[in-house]
Structures are given as structure tokens and as C-alpha cells.
């Protein structure tokens, strides 16, 4: 019987969820390939730095950095449009302006193109549905539908699965999973506003800090000031 290599592409933004997803994927597969996408986000400098540090730590079989400038050109979100203010976590909104329209669909499409070339049968993404920001492209139903579309749109002998290991977990459970896997949290960056010291006020910082507190652990990355949760 021929040995089948389990080969996976992991979308690694540099954030905590993608870091832990990289840790999960590395433990579940024979080969992992890390992909980072620059879409013009404010904190790309720090995210890219984190990506390279994560690659140095996990030593993937391959890594790529690519860019999709149209996301920034289209605008409509505060992560890429500096004329829009990134809201604080306590701002009331059913869908915060940090939502980047169809970002996850774009990222997975890019990953699928690479997967088809290297015959990777899994694509991992650190999407969170239960305890996230309510983005529509972070829902399980979306990923299942997209997976079907990918397999219709690729060559007949190629099959790929979208893996979302964190999607049904609370943020505190994600932190505990990362700790269980000895994940180097200090290599990740979650802040939407700053490339040097995390603001502690944006939605991403708030969810991260709250998760560490509920998990009974301390977040190792630097924050601008003491944050009251």
C-alpha cells in the first residue's frame, strides 16, 4: 500500500488564532505550508514580522507571502481605510467596520490555488464563530459551502478540505488549547491599530485579553497601558 502524505496549507496572518491553528495543523499533518496575505491592513508590518517568526518556530515545508491590493482599493473597512476610525471594543454595532468584505473567501481561494499545485488536501484557517466579532465569513455554513465550491472548481482528481479547528471554541478555550500545544503566544500580534505596542482597546485586543483572563493565563505581548476588562 502506498503511503499517503497528509499535506496542508495554513493561512497565517500572524494573529493569535492563526498561530494556534498553525500549531494544530503542525500536529495533525506530515507536511505544512504557511501562507500569509497582505491586503493593505494597517498592521501589516507587525503581522508580517510575526509570520516570519512563526515560520522560524514551526519550520513549515514551504512558505509564501502574497498580496491582494484590491482589498485596500475597494475600501469599506477600517482595517485598510485610514479615514475610518477603528472602534473600541465597547462600541455597540451588529457588524463592526473592521469587517473586511469577503476577506476569508479571498484568502481561501488563494490557498486553494496553491494547494492544487502542490496537492495539499487540507486548508486551515483560524476562523472563530462562537466568540468572535460576528463576521459573516467566519461561519461554519460559509466554509462548508465554499469547500463544496472549491471541489467543483478544481481538477477531478483533486479534493481539498477546509479545516476550522477553532470555529466552535470560546476564546478562552482557544487560549487553553494553545497552552496545551505549547504555542508561543509571544510571536503573535492581534492589535488592529498599532504595529509596536498593542492598544488594548480595539475589538481584537479586547477579545484576546479577555480570553487570557478567563483562561487564568497572562498574555505575553506588550500593551500600551493596563487594560480594564
Image (cartoon, rainbow, N blue to C red):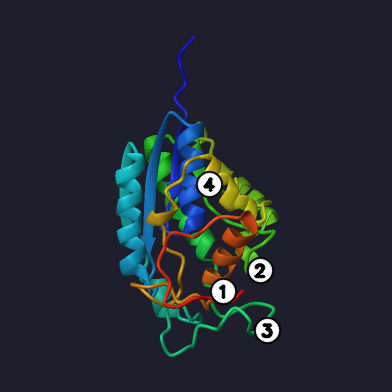
Q: Position of residue 34 (x, y in %)?
A: 38, 46
| Residue annotated with mark 3 | 92
Kindly indicate whether the residue at mark 3 contacts the one at mark 4 (C-beta within 8 angstroms).
Answer: no
Q: Which mark is residue 178?
A: 4
Q: Secondary structure at mark 1?
A: helix
Which residue is found at the position 39% from the left and 76% from the top? 194
Q: Position of residue 201 (x, y in %)?
A: 52, 78
Q: Secondary structure at mark 3?
A: loop
| Residue annotated with mark 2 | 134
Q: Secondary structure at mark 2?
A: loop
Tell me which label, 4 or 3, sits earlier in the chain. Answer: 3
| Residue annotated with mark 1 | 203
Vertically, is 41 above or below 2? Answer: below
Kindly indicate whether the residue at mark 1 contacts the one at mark 3 (C-beta within 8 angstroms).
Answer: no
Viewer-nearest residue: 16 or 168: 16
Query: Residue 161, can we see it?
Result: yes
Kindly indicate whether the residue at mark 4 contacts the one at mark 1 (C-beta within 8 angstroms).
Answer: no
Vertically, is 183 above or below 210? Answer: above
Tell me which label, 1 or 2, sits earlier in the chain. Answer: 2
Considering every residue shown, the one lying at the far bottom of the view is 83
How far apart marks 1 and 4 lie (CA) works out to 20 Å
How far apart marks 4 and 3 lie (CA) works out to 30 Å
Q: Nearer the viewer, mark 2 or mark 4?
A: 4
How far apart marks 1 and 2 lie (CA) works out to 11 Å
Amino acid at each position: 500500500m502506498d503511503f499517503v502524505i497528509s499535506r496542508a496549507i495554513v493561512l497565517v496572518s500572524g494573529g493569535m488564532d492563526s498561530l494556534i491553528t498553525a500549531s494544530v495543523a503542525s500536529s495533525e499533518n506530515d507536511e505544512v505550508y504557511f501562507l500569509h496575505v497582505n491586503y493593505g491592513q494597517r498592521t501589516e508590518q507587525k503581522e508580517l514580522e510575526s509570520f516570519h517568526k512563526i515560520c522560524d518556530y514551526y519550520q513549515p515545508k514551504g512558505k509564501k507571502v502574497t498580496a491582494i491590493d484590491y482589498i485596500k482599493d475597494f475600501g469599506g473597512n477600517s482595517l485598510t481605510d485610514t479615514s475610518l476610525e477603528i472602534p473600541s471594543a465597547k462600541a455597540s454595532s451588529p457588524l463592526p467596520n473592521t469587517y473586511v468584505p469577503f476577506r476569508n473567501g479571498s484568502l481561501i481561494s488563494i490557498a486553494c490555488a496553491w494547494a492544487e499545485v502542490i496537492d495539499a488536501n487540507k486548508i486551515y484557517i483560524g476562523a472563530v464563530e462562537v466568540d468572535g466579532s460576528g463576521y459573516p465569513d467566519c461561519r461554519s455554513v460559509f466554509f462548508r459551502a465554499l469547500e463544496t465550491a472549491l471541489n467543483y472548481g478544481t481538477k477531478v482528481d483533486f479534493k481539498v478540505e477546509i479545516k476550522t479547528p477553532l470555529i466552535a471554541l470560546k476564546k478562552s478555550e482557544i487560549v487553553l488549547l494553545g497552552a496545551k500545544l505549547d504555542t508561543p503566544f509571544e510571536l503573535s500580534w492581534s492589535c488592529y491599530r498599532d504595529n509596536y505596542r498593542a492598544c488594548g482597546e480595539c475589538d481584537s485586543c479586547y477579545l484576546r485579553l479577555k480570553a487570557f483572563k478567563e483562561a487564568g493565563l497572562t498574555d505575553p505581548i506588550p500593551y500600551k497601558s493596563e487594560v480594564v476588562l
